[in-house]
Amino acid sequence: MPEGVDACPACLSPLGASGTAVPGSPPPAAWRLVFRGTGGHLEVPPGAELRLGRDADWAPEAAGLLAGETSVSARHALVAHGEDGAASVTEVPQGATNGVRVNDRVLSPGRSEPLRDGDTVWLGPWVALRVCGPGRAGGP
């Protein structure tokens, strides 16, 4: 870490003199995906991967929120939150019939796209998720 930096730039956890997290400091915050229209949300903690789709076995966290969304595939996309605090989304190869977009960028299946706070992820033509970065109070 550069000299004078007292918090992790990714998660805002306090840092000790050695640049490591201070014991007893709060864990890094999760990225939050807020579904437009319903207000439902899912969280992706550091080091985790969240599967987005209608298949309850493959995407147990998301399937309930996406069950009635026929434009979303059973296995549509993956959102990953790296230990470094960065997040990305990947369209599942041979899975997403109606594709994935981040804002106005169309994703290629199997290719990871970085996410930023405030991005909108589209699963097909009608289902949108607002991306809220770690430490952001509330949601959109």
Image: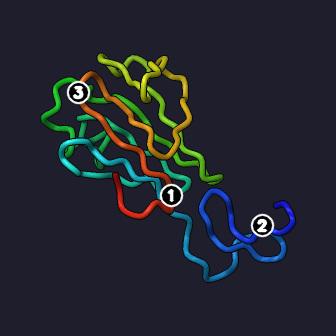
Residue 122: quarter of image: top left
Alpha-carbon span between mark 3 and mark 1: 26 Å
Q: Which residue is mark 2?
A: 5
> Could you say which disc has been placed on residue 126 in the image?
3
Q: Secondary structure at mark 2?
A: loop
Q: Is residue 99 left or right of residue 40?
A: right
Amino acid on which disc 3 is placed: Trp
Q: Answer with mark 1 or mark 2, whichever residue precedes in sequence.
A: 2
Residue, far right: 3
Q: For residue 7, which quarter of the picture?
A: bottom right
Expressed as whole percent of the image width and height from the top left, the position of residue 31 reads 46, 53
Is 121 placed above or below 84 here?
A: above
From the image, which quarter does the N terminus lie in? bottom right
Mark 1 against mark 2, which lies toward the viewer? 2
- Earlier along the polypeptide chain: callout 3 or callout 1? 3
Residue most toward the bottom?
24
The spot of residue 88 in percent (x, y) is 53, 38
The amino acid sitting under disc 2 is Val
Question: Which residue is drawn at the image coordinates 67% and 81% (left, top)?
Answer: 23
> Mark 3 Cα within 10 Å, few/some/many (few <14, many 20+)?
few
Is disc 3 in contact with disc 2, using a CB cutoff of under 8 Å?
A: no
Q: Assign a secondary structure to mark 3.
A: loop
Give the residue type that dot 1 points to: Pro
- Of residue 37 and residue 110, the one placed in the foreground of this image is 37
